Amino acid sequence: MRAPKSFRLHIGIFGRRNAGKSSILNALTHQEVSIVSEVAGTTTDPVEKPMELLPLGPVLFIDTAGIDDTGILGEKRVAKTLSVFDRTDLGIIVSNFNDWGDYEEKLISELKTREIPFIVAFNKSDLYPEDLGITAILGQSKIRFVFTSAPRQSGISELRQLLLKSAPDDFINRPSILADLVGPGEAAVLVVPIDKEAPKGRLILPQVQSIRDLLDNDCFSVVVKERELREALSRFNKPPKLVVTDSQAFLKVAADTPPEIPMTSFSILFARFQGDLNALVRGAMTIDNLKAGDKVLIAEACSHHPIGEDIGSVKIPRWLTQYVGGKLEIDNMRGHDFPFNISEYKLIIHCGACMWNRREMLSRIMKAQQAGVPITNYGLTIAYSLGIFERALQPFPAALSIYHKESL
């Protein structure tokens, strides 16, 4: 089974038109992934290529349009390119010594500002000799660089080695989803409702990833439907360390789980795993400030077609309306698109972002904070709206402490 995008290191390839970005991608993957042409601006929308980059593991290369594109259409291509920064874990700037200038310096500045590690690939090295002044400056700034010639496969092996050396530590040493809350030899009970939105014949990604995380860390995993939870718990000689539920079943699971057993949801686990749990807890607490008529953005990483009682477009709006006591103005947005001006919203509610890498979710949290707009996620919103927020934060002492201190 292919690794999901959320588990892949996202490597963004940036540079001017005709710098050789697509050629570099094709050389790295040994495939004709991107169209290569002497005509500048051949690449339009970002091109993605998943692959295994051993010994690093699963990665996702993203080839982008030139940042020097012009015209109305060119501006849109540049905007698409800049949006790729939001999900880039590791960057490659492709240029040559003849063209190096302001565009490349702006790319370096943007990557540094976002604290994204990057490498400079001086492509077409067979045509343009080294400029010692440029490489001296990069060396002083401790910026890694390599000389490449994509058509000749020159320097590609060295580029691969630099990618391995430059990968962020949080990708190499990825944190646990929930196993650290359980411990080796201990059990977690996962409550998985089977309803209309459950995919036929399989589990959704957060459930699968949680089971695998438990198995990888020598924990016991017990999976039940919500109506079986009470009976399952009665059969334990030793109580499980944690009960995790789909957020939509929060009330029933909270009622059936003894108070001494910590309980939370998959969505809240992913608030920690994919985002910043403490920031999202603070965002949920601003639900108390909402008034009828306020604008709320509900954003979802997936672009699936909602059916029936969809969580993002039906259930959360209903629970929020009941909590606030009046109708809210709610906008729904799916996929990588995100409003340019988010300052008009009183709250942003995001899904668990299980289909993304952590970088993109953290980028959205950063954008919300810069705009002064609170942001939270589905599970935290549901727990707060249903009055079981404190119970759902029980496994997370730091987040629970924030709630206690800031709710006074």
Image (tube, grey):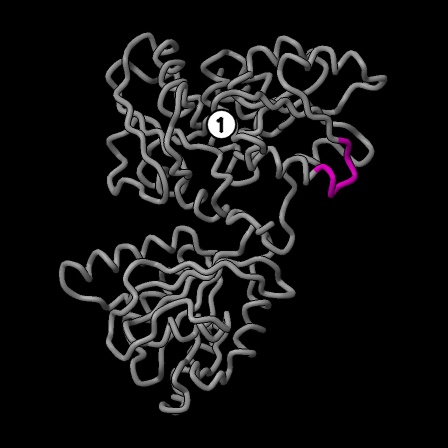
Density class for disc 1 (Cα within 10 Å; few <14, some 14-19, many ≥20) is many
Q: Is residue 110 left or right of residue 282?
A: left
351 left or right of 313 in image: right
177, 132: nearer the viewer: 177
Q: Position of residue 291 (x, y in %)?
A: 29, 14
Residue at 31%, 66% in the rendered image: 106
* Residue at the farthest left position: 71
Q: Residue at x 68, y 40 (%)?
A: 213
Q: Amino acid at mark 1?
A: Val
Query: x, y percentage for residue 358?
Result: 50, 46
- The answer to which quarter of the image holds residue 193 is top right
391 or 319: nearer the eye? 319
Residue at 47 percent of width and 75 percent of height: 27
- Relative to 58, does residue 236 appear above or below in the rendering? above
* Residue 70, quarter of picture: bottom left
- Magenta-drawn segment: 214-220
Element type at mark 1: helix
Q: Disc 1 marks which residue?
A: 281
x then y, percent, for residue 45: 30, 58
Closer-to-camera residue (227/202): 202
Residue sitting nearer the eye, 308 or 383:
308
Using residue 148 as the reference point, say whether residue 106 is left or right of it.
left
Q: Is residue 398 above or below residue 131?
A: above
- Left/right of residue 5 with respect to residue 32 in the rendered view: right
Residue 372 sits above or below residue 323 on the image:
below
Question: What is the residue that sits farthest to the front in this orientation?
Answer: 201
